[in-house]
Amino acid sequence: MQFMRIESIEIENYRVFKRAKLDALPRLIALVGANGTGKSTLFDVFSFLKDALAFNVGKAVARRGGLHELKSRGQPGPIWFEIKFRESGGRLATYELAIGEREGRVVVEREVLKFKSKGGGDPFSVCADFSFGKGSVIIDEQFPAQYEAPKQLLTYSLDEPDILAIKGLGQFKNFRILSEFRSLIENWQISDFHIADARPTTDEGYAEHLSTRGENLAQVAQFLYTYHRERFDQVLDAMKRRVPGVTEVEAKPTEDGRLVLRFQDGSFKDPFIARFVSDGTIKMFAYLVLLHDPKPFPLLAIEEPENQLYPELLGDLAEEFRAYAQRGGQVFVSTHSPEFLNALNLDEIYCLRKEHGFTFIHHASDSENLKSLFEGGDLPGYLWKQGLFEGVNH
């Protein structure tokens, strides 16, 4: 399946987001803003949609304290999301989801998936439209060149009114766009990397992808070494260039069938096992392993990657994120680091600003002042440090 890039996200009534929109999204997106403006909440939107798909909407809401805790204070109407993306055929598709309550139960008030039509008439063709567990869907949506021809419309009743239609119907290839969007969300990766989890030895074996917490780091390193040696060598080369002293990294099996990571420092005869190297070394290695994954996640979200890393490494790390995004995975990063921002273009930065208890999101490139300064040679990180990202340092 061709990589599907999200083009815009709109949010209503979700915690601090009474109404917020990120549009014209590039492949690499950096979020900046003062503490408490909602950077973590935006990442939780991704986690919420993934939970709603994996379980159901009711459970996803319950895990966040219930609808009264999740919904923006004092706001009428449902929680509402709109995601625009390019489906594999290249057309613009739109997914809308409204979540409310009926008779004391969390329900899906409306779920619609539609795509941009050709020619005149209605600019959109709806391929699925559901409310409270009932709705209709177009079958056999392979859509050849003459896809405006009438398609068979089927009605369905879901088991419960809090189940997403894309969860059930997205399992069938006849509903291609639903299936693609379901797969897109299922494969989102919202990283919650913990250095302490990556340090211990781990069971011997392979893991193809780094987990959200990073506890399988040695297994993924072993997988890359065994099946994608060129990528492992790229990770090692990047470690040698970017972490002073590191000359070798290996995932070594022990006699009891476990794996340990060992880092060779050129200044010492014997290598250091993972629990004895610095936090920054472990974290940089984990990021490089993640970002050299042969099959990038379609969406990768990471909060404040600069923690535990030397500032001089952050420009290189930003370039690694961009390279990953260009290979097929859209990347969202929140940051407070001027050094990280200095490696970005202005159109890759979005500013979160809180007013009267609610957060609004602005594209940095929409600011004529910032654009003029950037085009004049000023770097985004320095502009951020000087407080010139209007409202975001307050």
Image (cartoon, helix red, strand yellow):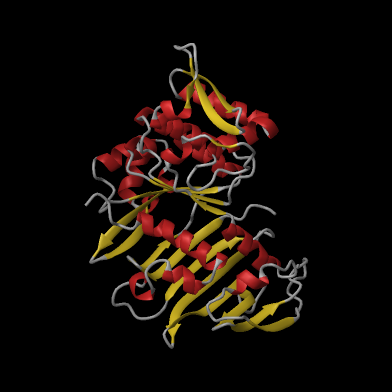
The answer to whether any part of residue 277 appears in the image is no
The residue at the point 57 percent across, 81 percent down is 160
What is the quadrant of the N terminus in the image? bottom right
Q: Nearer the viewer, residue 276 or 330?
A: 276
The answer to whether any part of residue 105 appears in the image is yes
Percent across and percent down for residue 332 are 46, 49
| Image quarter of residue 53 | bottom right
| Image quarter of residue 76 | bottom left
Q: Residue 96 vs residue 139: left or right?
A: left
Q: Nearer the viewer, residue 380 or 181?
A: 181
Q: Nearer the viewer, residue 34 or 51?
A: 51
Percent across and percent down for residue 166 are 61, 70
Q: Is residue 225 above or below residue 207?
A: above
The residue at the point 63 percent across, 42 percent down is 208
Percent across and percent down for residue 6 are 54, 57
Q: Residue 191 vs residue 342: left or right?
A: right
Q: Is residue 147 above or below residue 209?
A: below
Q: Is residue 135 above or below residue 368?
A: below
| Image quarter of residue 245 | top left
Q: Nearer the viewer, residue 67 or 304?
A: 67
Q: Residue 2 vs residue 73: left or right?
A: right
